[in-house]
Structure formats: C-alpha cells, structure tokens
Image (tube, rainbow, N blue to C red):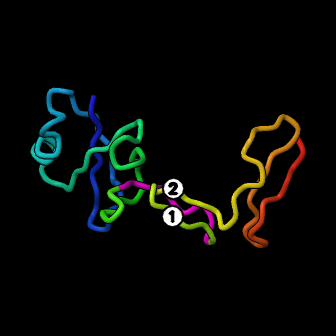
C-alpha cells in the first residue's frame, strides 16, 4: 500500500490516504482524479519518502522536500532532516530506569527527574 498526503494552499496536511500498490506509480494523478482535485504528495510510514510520515496538521517544506510536525518549543530549530532539535542536546542519550530528562523552555535547559 502507498500513502499520499493532501496539502492546503499553505502546505499543511489535510488528510493522508492509502492507495493500492497498483496505483503507486501514478498515485498523485490517481488521488487528483478520485478526490476531484487537490495537491497531493507521496509519504511513507517508514520516513523513506520526504523524511517523515505526513500526519494531519503537519507541514510540507518544499526546500527540504520533507514533512514535519509542530514545533515543540519556541527555542527548538528544524534540522536538515526535518527533525526538531533543542538548542543544547539532552545530557544523556541513553534510557535509564531511575531517571529521565524533560526540556524546560523558560531556562532552555534539560531538567533531570527521578522515577
């Protein structure tokens, strides 16, 4: 199955539909015909097409050729892979059973929390 996202005039995803594999090659044209118009782009659950799977409300960036979700915090920026990055990396990238980190936007730092 192939997946296609319909965009509004501001490149915001309106819906994502599933198309039979037999129509994947002409999926954009198939969606335009079946749904009577619209702007359509293919997306992939694995993120192998346009970097991230499109979700309703996500944005499509033509320069990056990528879909991305809402900015989680004002201080975070979008990287070249269309992923939101904090101003400073999380202090410990491993998963621990005794603690975790949460972003604090006011101080723009990671705060440790014990479980």
**Vertical placement of 52 versus 80: above or below?**
above
In reply to whether residue 91 is colored magenta, the answer given is: no
The residues tagged by marks 1 and 2 sit, at their Cα atoms, a distance apart of 5 Å
Residue occupying the point 28% across, 61% down: 8
> Residue drawn at (32%, 57%), measured in percent from left and top?
65
**Could you say whether the residue bearing mark 1 is in a helix, strand or loop?**
strand
Position of residue 33 measured from the top left corner of the image (x, y, whole percent): 9, 45
Which residue is found at the position 26% from the left and 67% from the top?
9
Where does the image place residue 15, in percent across and percent down from the top left? 33, 48
Front residue of 103 and 8: 103
Asked where in the image residue 29 lies, by quadrant, the reply is: top left
The answer to if 68 sits in the magenta stretch is yes
Against 10, residue 101 (above or below) is above
| Corner quadrant of residue 27 | top left
Q: Is residue 81 above or below residue 76?
A: above
Q: Is residue 3 left or right of residue 76?
A: left
Between residue 39 and residue 48, name the one nearer to us: 48
Which residues are the magenta region?
A: 66-74
Q: Main secondary structure of the magenta part?
A: loop
- State the quadrant of the C terminus: top right
| Contact between labelled residues 2 and 1, with CB atoms less than 8 Å apart | yes
- Quarter of image, res 110: bottom right
Label annotation for residue 83: 2
**Residue in the image at 72% along x and 46% along y:** 93
Task: Report helix, strand or loop for mark 2.
Answer: loop
Tally the numbered discs: 2
According to the picture, the residue beneath numbered tag 1 turns out to be 78
Q: Could you classify mark 1 by the number of other residues whose Cα lies within 10 Å: few (under 14), some (14-19), or many (20 or more)? A: few
In what quadrant of the picture does the N terminus appear? top left
């Amino acid at each position: 199955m192939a997946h296609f996202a319909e965009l509004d005039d501001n490149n915001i995803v309106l819906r994502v539909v599933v198309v039979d594999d037999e129509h994947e090659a002409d999926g954009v044209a198939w969606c335009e015909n079946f749904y009577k118009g619209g702007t359509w782009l293919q997306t992939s659950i694995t993120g192998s097409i346009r970097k991230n799977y499109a979700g309703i409300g996500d944005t499509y960036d033509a320069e990056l050729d990528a879909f991305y979700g809402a900015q989680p915090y004002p201080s975070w920026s979008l990287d070249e892979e269309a992923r939101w990055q904090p101003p400073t990396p999380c202090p410990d990238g491993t998963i621990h059973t005794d603690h975790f980190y949460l972003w604090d936007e006011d101080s723009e730092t990671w705060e440790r929390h014990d479980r």
